[in-house]
Amino acid sequence: MAPRAADIQPTILHPPVVANNFEIKPGLVTMIQNNVQFHGLRDESPRDHVQRFIEIAGSLKINGVPKDALKLRSFPYSLAGLSRPPLSITSWDDLLNKFMTQYCPSSKTSERRKKMAHFEQRG
């Protein structure tokens, strides 16, 4: 049985925004999708992705909209086909923690540190 529209919940529980005319403009979505798409591939850096996303989102200012609310509403457009359970993210810090835990686990970080420690410059 197919889910009803009323049963489908967003991944992010968005904080209230004072501005009643706030919307994510198509130009912003296009800019994010063209410049910071993250697919979760092995050769992609989650840290670089977040840094590039923050650079774009940080350049925006909308009266009555907190910066974290803008980032929370925009970040999903930077992810290609990745999802989370409904209402599983409640703040920008929560989103960053879950994203980094999933795509940059401590085992991966330890592996990179070992490779760097054993790296020899060839001349």
Image: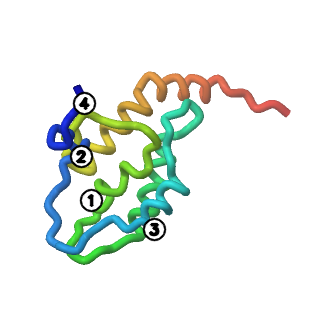
Looking at the image, tell me whether mark 4 or mark 3 is earlier in sequence order. Answer: 4
Q: Identify the disc placed on residue 116.
A: none
Mark nearer the N terminus (1 vs 2): 2
Quadrant location, the N terminus: top left
Q: Which residue is mark 3?
A: 27
* Label 1 – label 3 distance at C-alpha: 19 Å
Residue 54 placed where, x, y %? 41, 58
Residue hosting label 1: 68
Residue found at the very far front of the displayed protein: 1
Q: Secondary structure at mark 4?
A: loop
Direction from residue 94 to residue 108 in the image, left or right: right
Judging by the rendered image, the residue that carries numbered circle 2 is 12
Q: Nearer the viewer, mark 4 or mark 2?
A: 4
Q: Looking at the figure, which quarter contains the C terminus? A: top right
**Are dots 1 and 2 in contact, CB under 8 Å?**
no
SS under mark 2: loop
Residue under pointer 4: 2
Dot 3 alpha-carbon crowd within 10 angstroms: few under 14, some 14 to 19, many 20 or more: few
Q: Give me the C-alpha separation between circle 1 and circle 4.
A: 34 Å
Indicate the position of residue 38 as horizontal and vertical percent values.
49, 43
Q: Nearer the viewer, mark 1 or mark 2?
A: 2
Structural distance between the alpha carbons of marks 4 and 2 = 22 Å
